[in-house]
Image: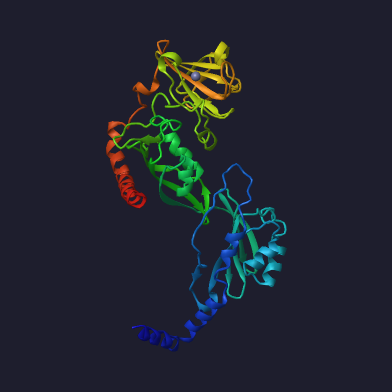
Amino acid sequence: MSGNDTGILAHKPLTLTKKRLRWLVLLSSFPLFGMMAAFGIAPDTSTGAHPIENVIRSLELPEIQPFEDYDMTFWRQERIQAGDTIASLLSRLGVNNQDVVGFLQDTRGSRGVNQLIAGKVVHAQTTAAGELRLLRYFSGGSEQLVMEKVEGAFRVSEQPVRFETHIQMKSGVIDSSLFAATDGAGVPEGVATQMVDILSSDIDFHRDLRKGDRFTVVYDSLYGNGEPARPGRVLAMEFINQGTPHRAIYFQSEDGTGGYYAPDGKNMRKAFLRTPLEFSRISSGFSSGRFHPILKTWRAHKGIDYAAPTGTRVKAAANGTVSFAGWKGGYGNVVILQHHGQHSTVYGHLSAFAKGLRAGQRVSQGEVVGYVGATGMATGPHLHYEFLVNGVQRDPTRIAMPSAESVAAKHMPAFYTHTKPLMARLDMLRETSLAFLD
Ligand SMILES: [Zn+2]
């Protein structure tokens, strides 16, 4: 069998036309794996607020456009490295010296060309002889710089980036922390944060998470010129918390309002957040024996203590009005919010208030009202949170909270049409991840 294969291979070149032989020669003489070094060496050196994302992907071969033999062109891409000059970049892209010189002359006045940012990617279309046809430079905004050779001279223009959406699906299981699990699954930080926000009315991520909890998430990522350009939006997710599955699906109705809904069309957002404390990479990793977030003996304590580092953001649990923001005995710095109806909430031991916060001010759910501290009768930084009904402290975890508006009955057919394929993906991922993780 193998002898037969060898025979075929050995004879194959003999059947090639002259044209195809040239193809073979060109392909083998071209540095096909030039990208490997570019990906391995150059880190993303952007210093912006966006988290650095490591993208691991398989090696790509240059796209070959098999037109006429003589017109054959290659696409190559190189990551800009610190200290790169345009000339050094062009020569790494395989551009011949003549065109490097021409390019430098023709684009001398272009600001964009002279402001190359390390870590960004340049795509070049060249002929086999190293003649530069087209250069595309994508610096992260919604515009790309295009340098095209027209009648022997290079012209620079700004063009809109061609974005494409890639739908990603990831699954994970909680072992030590939520962020360790999302990191492990390759879920971007921005998506992990959305997952927490989406379920913030149903799950108290500070207290309810357990080892063995599982998630699956479907989200989109925008790519521009092959580079991740913007953090994606969660389209659907499932979180199995202590054995109970929570599913949420993004749906935008005809009138343009979008939100997250349960599979039956109920809004995932409730009148009150399950916890008024920001859940972040930092606060989630915080623990201390004394202030482990637990509901203390209800009769004695009448509140929930959340351990968190000083400065962690404290959010309004619901829309309301500030009825008090100041110092109050053992509470230290405290904010009291009055909500619609008979509810009020109390946030104690704050290190600081939100800038300009004062009595009478209206606040929205999730808005920052202050920062965790240890003022008043507190021996360590934590948030003391109280939930009151008609002035009496109640356990918020035992009170059914009203939801925000569900999908309108007239939009339910559209909702089911939209959610069906996403639910199918979640089902598929649940099967796959259970089989894989067990
Ligand atoms: Zn307390």
Instruction: Say above or below: 381 vs 419.
Output: above
**Farthest residue, direction front:** 289
Quadrant of the rendered structure where residue 110 is? Answer: bottom right
Work out whether residue 174 or residue 262 is closer to the camera in this orientation and state it.
174
Q: Is residue 367 something one can see in this rendering?
A: no
Task: Point out residue 270 in the picture as x, y percentages from the top left corner.
Answer: 38, 27
Q: Residue at x 35, y 27 (%)?
A: 405
Counting labels gives 0
Instruction: Say above or below: 377 vs 244.
Output: above
Please indicate whether residue 215 sits to the left or right of residue 313 in the image: left
Task: Point out residue 339 in the picture as x, y percentages from the top left corner.
Answer: 44, 17
Instruction: Say above or below: 22 vs 370.
Output: below
Quadrant of the rendered structure where residue 148 is? Answer: bottom right
How are the residues colored? rainbow
Which image quarter holds the N terminus? bottom left
Task: Point out residue 174 in the picture as x, y percentages from the top left corner.
Answer: 42, 42
Q: Residue at x 66, y 68 (%)?
A: 91
Please indicate whether residue 77 sits to the left or right of residue 112 in the image: left
Work out whether residue 128 or residue 157 is closer to the camera in this orientation and state it.
128
Q: Residue at x 47, y 48 (%)?
A: 184
Q: Is residue 156 something one can see in this rendering?
A: yes
Task: Point out residue 19 in the picture as x, y percentages from the top left corner.
Answer: 49, 83
